[in-house]
Image: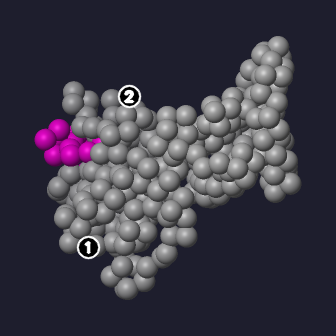
Amino acid sequence: MKGADIVYRVKKVVNNNIVCAIDDKEEEVILRGLGIGFHKKSGEEVPEELIEKVYRMDGTKSTNKLQELLAEIPLEYVEVCTDIIDHARDILGRRLNNNIYITLTDHISFAITRQKENLEYKNAMLSEIKCFYPQEYELGVEALSIIEKRLGIRLSIDEAGFIALHIVNAELDTNMSSMVQITELIQKILEIVTEYYQMQFDEESLYYSRFITHLKFFGQRLFMKKEVKNDDKVFQEMIKTQYPNDYECAKLIQQHIKKVYKKDITEEEMMFLTVHLRRISM
């Protein structure tokens, strides 16, 4: 967003179109605008009409990383990537970690460079991404259209999947390595569940969609070492007693995670897994 009614003073000129600035709360931001850095000096006030975008990052380290990145890539790439991110935030209606301005911009810029050199990466997880993150995948497809329309560069459909993962990363506040682990975990859990119940699930159903969403956050908690808090022992025992068949399936998932990842699942997590398994298997 633009900085209406906020005074920004130049801290450092990155290039003609990017400046590092300080706002009236002494917080550091990055400002983008055509000619915004031209002949500007440290301490000089930035005219509001020149500000096209304010990047407000979470901490000095992230601000410095974004500053370095924006200094290296063409302005039109920066503008397109920013518009893709802001569009994703609007469509999803959810908070995205501001580091996506670094990670996705860097990825798309590098993807464009690879495409110009006829080097393309195949996305081995494309089918899983389409299945588990359909809304983010559609945003990835839209991003490819925006890139082609604005820059005249056609990226492969594999890139829609990579872009989707970056968006999910920002939603869950994880990194790409954890996101790949989460996606692989979801795939394995679905294999365990399908084999256990010996049935094909309705992937369009509300309960299935909720189960996938639960698994995303379950994976995040697992790999980011976060725990869900629910000390209702009576309710936990009731779930185990009422849904013993589904609890056995949850135990298979628990055993797999212990074997492969050397991680334990709490009884709270087991309870929520059991409830979701019950719903999708009804």
Q: Main secondary structure of the magenta part?
A: loop
Q: Position of residue 122 (x, y in %)?
A: 49, 75
Q: Is residue 15 in view from this perspective?
A: no
Residue 234's place in the image compared with 174, above or below, is: above
Numbered badge on residue 25: 2
Position of residue 100 in the picture relative to residue 53 (left or right): right
- Single out the residue that lies furthest toward the bottom: 118
Position of residue 196 in the picture relative to residue 147 (left or right): right
Mark toward the start of the polypeptide (2 vs 1): 2
Position of residue 31 in the picture relative to residue 168 (left or right): left
Q: Mark 1: which amino acid?
A: Ile
Q: Is residue 53 magenta?
A: yes
Give the residue displayed 82% in from the left and 30% down from the top: 244
Q: Position of residue 219 (x, y in %)?
A: 66, 45
Numbered badge on residue 178: none
Quarter that holds the N terminus: top left
Q: Which residues are magenta?
A: 41-54
Give the residue displayed 40% in from the left and 47% down from the top: 135
Quarter residue 183 falls in: bottom right
Camera-side residue: 232 or 273? 273
Q: Report which residue position mark 1 lands on.
A: 153
Q: Mark 2: which amino acid?
A: Lys
Q: Is residue 145 in view from this perspective?
A: yes
